[in-house]
Amino acid sequence: AFCGAGESFLCASGICVPRKLQCNGYNDCDDWSDEAYCNCSENLFHCHTGKCLNYSLVCDGYDDCGDLSDEQNCDCNTTKKHRCGDGRCIAIEWVCDGDHDCVDKSDEANCSCHSQGLVECRNGQCIPSTFQCDGDEDCKDGSDEENCSDSQTPCQEGDQTCLHNSCLDSCGGSSLCDPNNGPSDCGQCEPITLELCMNLPYNHTNYPNYLGHRTQKEASISWESSLFPALVQTNCYKYLMFFACTILVPKCDVNTSQRIPPCRALCEYSKERCESVLGIVGLQWPEDTDCNQFPEEDSDNQTCLMPDEDVEECSPSHFKCRSGRCVLASRRCDGQADCDDDSDEENCGCKERDLWECPSSKQCLKHTVICDGFPDCPDMDEKNCSFCQSDELECANHDCVSRGLWCDGEPDCSDSSDEWDCVTLSKNVNSSSFLIVHRSATVYHVCADGWQEALSQLACKQMGLGQPSVTESIQEQEQEQDGQWLTLRSNWENLNGTTVHELLVKGQSCQSRSMISLLCSKQDCGRRPAARMNKRILGGRTSRPGRWPWQCSLQSEPSGHICGCVLIARKWVLTVAHCFEGRESAVVWKVVLGINNLDHPSTFMQMRHVKTIILHPRYSRAVVDYDISIVELSEDINETSYVRPVCLPSVEQSVEPDTYCYITGWGHMGNKMPFKLQEGEVRIISLEQCQSYFDMKTITNRMICAGYESGTVDSCMGDSGGPLVCERPGGQWTLFGLTSWGSVCFSKVLGPGVYSNVSYFVKWIERQIYIHTFLLNKSQG
């Protein structure tokens, strides 16, 4: 009765889950109580948690039960495996590779750093060479930041800050930073622009901050800027966000340009009350926030910061929701609900705010989104947007183009929409699909006279349908007039045409009176020939090479790995738009595929430079909506068992709530990024349920939510831009999401991760690939 009449199951932990999730082999209750009284058949292994496992998963080095009971008392072959202290056996290749795969870290004990391709600290600790002289003390004894004076570089005019005695930005023109000065001595005060700290009782900061971030932009996309707001909503400490902001955007005294730190007591109160919450989800308190580095509170309170008791929860630049939450005042009456109770959008007439009202939903829209080519109000905001003449047709962006120029092989609309869908296949004509070409808004059949297989290949490729498997010449069923045929130009082989329709001409007779019937076969996708198909990992675990051959790493110099990405075709990759903020030039990026361990390149690895970056034109950083981008590679990949594309869903294909899917990436574990690719299984959550977790963000139909309300995925494995894939019947994997915001690592604290909904964007993705393959490349060539 507590959970509802028979539809839900009451977990021992007190939460309710849908009853259909009981005895499904997943830890939906977080304490396995939904799996506790489930019977296993004789050919299955019964975990202590109650879960049933295929025996092939027992003693394989992975914790499939969730309590390691499937990895106890295993017979380790010492030539191939290493026995951890908890009894688990792991592959010998994982020993001394720089990752702690055993809980007791015994796999990394007594290792030579050099044998792992790593640098040895004075205390024997191993770190990647890129961690040397980077401003962070990665060695416990700090030896990686000693003797770094040679790394000083001249200051660039116009920059503003110094970092850890190494000049990254300006300290007075083009001179070197004084090695005796700390960062606070050479930074200048700058206005606070970090949105989540806009309600502080001070307005200026300087960088680097106490977490090593060099700019406010770097701080805004950091792990900590997601961690602290998530913790705030647990109500672990009233002034946690105040403390978080004092280290994310330290106060800068505008008179002295000196940085004013938080008081030690504020740090200790925050850590004492909130660190245990992080422990529940397997995360660590940020190690750069050692409270001993901050001074004790002084009587005049000038040497460090403590919050006043009467500090307003919401500053004058914020609006206070009825629920008590704070949202930026600029978001009041902006047409999007930011308060969990929608109170920021009450008493906001569209007309009074100079907004357009959608008749069906009464939603208020900005005039800039009316007639912009993207429907926001069903069937209304994109109507009557142009006044084209009778001999003109309307482009998708509402420009007008002469009817005679439509589908002539040259883009005349500024968005190229006059060249979209010019070549299609007819449907419902017996069992054959006839090739149809649209010219000047009229439908034509293609004459089979002189047709060659190369033209069938071009047609299938142009329609995004892969390779032709069957091409036939079929006699017309009904007498066609000569005006309804398109025939090949006599010199078509010399035209270097990039599209089929520009090689055809109308007005000539078809001698054979035969039409082209075409059957195209889509490129094989979503297959994992190198993976063990029956392998399933619960929670966050290291992934085997080849399990996710479409996973790639988006990298730039000198930073290295920045975001995850997904291979969708031999020359095309998807990621999220926010990965490119401030770095939209293709020349600084490269894509690495077939890699499992970032620190140990494998023989399967392929690298491609980036040729083009296509951001969605409606990407909004403020609300992280339309967060998707397409990347064109410099050349095709070589398709192997370890590098191959994932399938894209169709526009109408969606993934249902309570479906289990996978996320992968090199995300944070604790507060460090692992070298090995991580994978975790997550459950799809409805948008309505997802919205209940995020009172400061609006969940739109361009998003998918996945995670566990209290689940077993307890590491931040998902990189921004990394894939959320679901298995379809027949063992094919389809890409439904790209890691956008929120994070699985906070699923027990805040709720699910939020992913860009690939199904929503499929048409846009296909159009952009078509434009850049068949239209833009031709005009650039």
Image (cartoon, grey):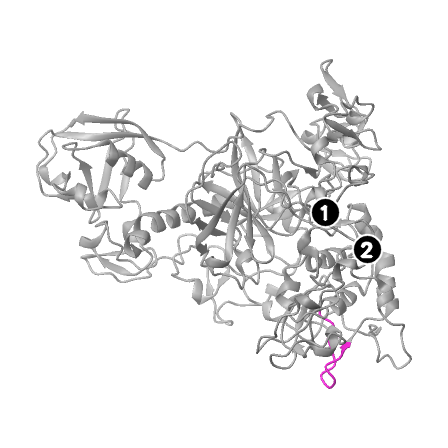
Q: Residue at x 85, y 64 (%)?
A: 291
Q: Nearer the viewer, residue 447 or 124?
A: 124
Q: Quadrant of residue 95?
A: top right
Q: Quadrant of residue 682?
A: top right
Sort mark 2 into few (<14), some (14-19) or many (20+) by Cα contacts within 10 Å.
few
Name the residue tied to disc 1: 669
Decide which of tag 2 and tag 1 comes sooner along the chain: 2
Q: Is residue 12 magenta?
A: no
> What percent of the width, then of the height, locates residue 401?
24, 58
Q: Residue at x 16, y 26 (%)?
A: 477
Asked which secondary structure carries label 2, the reply is: loop
The C terminus is located in which quarter? bottom left
Q: Quadrant of residue 269?
A: bottom right
> What percent of the width, then of the height, locates residue 716?
69, 47
- Assess whether mark 1 and mark 2 are in contact (beta carbons under 8 angstroms): no
Q: Main secondary structure of the magenta part?
A: loop
Residue 7, can we see it?
A: no
Determine whether 210 is above or below 279 in the image: below
* Tag in front: 2 or 1: 2
Residue type beneath disc 2: Lys
Q: Residue at x 79, y 21 (%)?
A: 75
Asked which secondary structure carries label 1, the reply is: loop
Residue type beneath disc 1: Met
Residue 678, can we see it?
A: yes
| 663 relative position to 641: left or right | right
Per the rendering, the mark at residue 140 is 2
Q: Nearer the viewer, residue 399 or 742?
A: 742
Separation of disc 2 and disc 1 at Cα?
18 Å
Q: Residue at x 76, y 64 (%)?
A: 244
Sort mark 1 into few (<14), some (14-19) or many (20+) by Cα contacts within 10 Å.
some
- Magenta segment: 249-259
